[in-house]
Image (cartoon, helix red, strand yellow):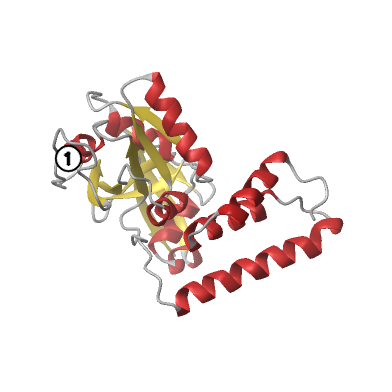
């Protein structure tokens, strides 16, 4: 038994005991491990939980259990969730090249639908999750980079937040409705990324905010770090000569010079 575990740990432990599917049990175990206090008195209990989780995952793989994992593509993966008929399929259709089925009848989406959103030349993968919130689909949600909750009112938002809690989802999210015009911009802002351009090929590269020239050069090739002399950055119409530790801004055009 863990020492000084928070109340949420015991909630997850109870869910583990009551869960019937492998996916639900694995999710509850992962939550218990996340919430376990890290100190000397809890080392054995933590090791036991990790061992049990590894065993369950191994057994699940041996039995050939079906997993609905979706390979991440692009620069980020964002899941789109909402109640039935909330407009999440409309959001996916408006932001990507996907053509999900849209109808007035509920639960039209029966499996995850995937599309690629373009933002200044950078690609973001959007995955629409069925409103049945099956455990196998919620495992995708727990492993994505961020969430978009499509909601038409505060009541729907509260229900969706409860769905996230019940499925141990802790990703950052924004709440939108299908009529918003700034969804794409808001998704990008939530991801905390910037777009930097390479001067040689005039191609966009996504980097985390507060990224440096070193991050940029390392993404291209490790040899660029080894042989680096200086970078020439074009920003707001002016030229800047910089070293590896110089911070980059969204929209910078970067040219690397080697020894």
Identity of the residue drawn at 39% across and 33% down: 189
Where residue 46 appears, as percent x and y from the top left, is 74, 61
Would residue 239 be seen by someone viewing this image from the given angle? no
Where residue 16 appears, as percent x and y from the top left, is 60, 55
Q: Which of 222 and 168 is in front in this view?
A: 168
Identity of the residue drawn at 34% across and 39% down: 81
Where residue 214 appears, as percent x and y from the top left, is 49, 54
Q: Mark 1 points at which residue?
A: 93
Identity of the residue drawn at 38% across and 43% down: 233
Q: Which of 125 and 215 is in front in this view?
A: 125
Badge 1: residue crowd in 10 Å (few <14, some 14–19, many ≥20)? some
Which residue appears farthest toward the top when viewing the image?
Answer: 154
Taking the image as shown, residue 197 lies to the left or right of residue 31, namely: left
Residue 147: quadrant of the picture: top left
Placement of 99 over or under 45, stated as above or below: above
Q: Quadrant of the C terminus?
A: bottom left
Q: How many marks?
A: 1
Residue 11: quadrant of the picture: top right
Placement of 67 over or under 34, stated as above or below: below
Would residue 12 be seen by someone viewing this image from the given angle? yes
| Element class at badge 1 | helix
Which residue appears farthest toward the bottom when viewing the image?
Answer: 62
Placement of 169 over or under 82, stated as above or below: below
Residue 119: quadrant of the picture: top left
Where residue 250 appears, as percent x and y from the top left, is 37, 37
């Amino acid at each position: 038994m863990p020492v000084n575990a928070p109340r949420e740990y015991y909630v997850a432990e109870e869910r583990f005991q009551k869960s019937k599917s492998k996916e639900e049990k694995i999710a509850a175990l992962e939550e218990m491990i996340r919430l376990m206090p890290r100190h000397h008195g809890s080392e054995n209990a933590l090791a036991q939980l990790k061992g049990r989780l590894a065993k369950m995952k191994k057994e699940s793989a041996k039995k050939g259990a079906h997993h609905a994992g979706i390979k991440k593509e692009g620069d980020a993966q964002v899941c789109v969730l909402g109640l039935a008929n909330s407009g999440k399929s409309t959001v996916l259709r408006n932001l990507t090249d996907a053509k999900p089925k849209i109808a007035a009848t509920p639960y039209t989406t029966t499996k995850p639908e995937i599309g690629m959103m373009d933002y200044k030349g950078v690609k973001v993968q959007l995955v629409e999750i069925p409103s049945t919130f099956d455990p196998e689909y919620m495992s995708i949600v727990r492993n994505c980079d961020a969430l978009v909750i499509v909601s038409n009112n505060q009541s729907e938002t509260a229900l969706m937040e409860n769905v996230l809690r019940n499925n141990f989802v802790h990703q950052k999210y924004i709440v939108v409705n299908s009529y918003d015009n700034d969804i794409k911009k808001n998704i990008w802002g939530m991801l905390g990324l910037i777009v930097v351009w390479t001067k040689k090929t005039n191609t966009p590269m996504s980097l985390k905010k507060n990224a440096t020239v070193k991050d940029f050069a390392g993404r291209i090739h490790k040899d660029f770090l080894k042989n680096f002399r200086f970078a020439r950055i074009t920003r707001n119409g002016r030229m800047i000569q910089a070293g590896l530790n110089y911070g980059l801004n969204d929209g910078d055009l970067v040219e690397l010079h080697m020894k």
